[in-house]
Image (cartoon, rainbow, N blue to C red):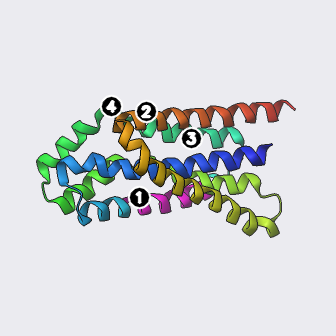
Amino acid sequence: MTAGLLFLLVFCGGFSIMSIELLGGRILAPYFGSSIYVWGSLITVFMLALSIGYLLGGRFSLQNPSLKRFGALFIASALLTLPLLLAGNLLMDVVFEYVEDPRYGSLLASVVLFLLPTIALGMISPYAVRLLVDHRDESGHVAGKLYFVSTIGSALGTLLTSFYLVLYFEVNQILIAIFLALLLCGATAFASGFRQAAV
């Protein structure tokens, strides 16, 4: 049961990452357009943030790993998306006022808006590996399965967001749904952790 839950949560994390990245293009477009510069900035920031998240997630998993702490990663990820919802336009206005160049402006805006939530989301997969690995000799197999599930989630997040969600919903509506989904994932991990401790 715990393994299935972890795979499901990792899937949701992967879905959220790519959905937010695609929405990032929509958020930046009114200010900096949708040129190769903008997408290059977005992809660079997301890849950098994920690499930091993988590193931090691995380190965080060494200290008393538990489902409760795993749930805290989802809660943190959700809370770090709040600036996008509450002050996204304001932050974009400030960045655009000082840096109008689409290259450096989009890069700075991507860092301000997306670096921290993506770092938190990047911590999810390596932490899940630690929770699932019981023996060192199976770590590679477990990591492969988890990153497979995470990447499938990312692929579906990309397709569903770009093909359907942006056609029927506003950007903020989709972000609210992601925020709530991450909170639900965190609460589910917490509840499972409490049940596991009670057994």
- The correct choice, above or below, for 136 with respect to 183 in the image is below
Of 127 and 142, nearer the camera is 142
The C terminus appears in which quarter of the rendering? Answer: top right
Number of residues whose C-alpha sits closer than 10 Å to that of mark 3, classed few (under 14), some (14–19) or many (20 or more): many
Number of residues whose C-alpha sits closer than 10 Å to that of mark 2, classed few (under 14), some (14–19) or many (20 or more): some
- The correct choice, above or below, for 77 with respect to 33 in the image is above
Tell me where the magenta segment starts and ends, as one range.
45-58
Q: Secondary structure at mark 4?
A: helix
The residue under label 4 is 86
Q: Secondary structure at mark 1?
A: helix
Q: Residue at x 29, y 38 (%)?
A: 88
Residue 198 position in % (x across, y down): 84, 29
The residue under label 1 is 46
The residue under label 2 is 176
As measured in the structure, the alpha-carbon distance from the residue carrying label 1 to the one carrying label 2 is 20 Å
Residue 126 located within the stretch drawn in magenta: no
As measured in the structure, the alpha-carbon distance from the residue carrying label 4 to the one carrying label 3 is 19 Å
| Amino acid on which disc 2 is placed | Ile
Query: In the image, which disc is placed on residue 6?
Result: none
As measured in the structure, the alpha-carbon distance from the residue carrying label 3 to the one carrying label 2 is 14 Å
Which sits earlier in the primary sequence, circle 4 or circle 2?
4
Number of residues whose C-alpha sits closer than 10 Å to that of mark 1, classed few (under 14), some (14–19) or many (20 or more): many
The residue under label 3 is 74
| Amino acid on which disc 1 is placed | Phe
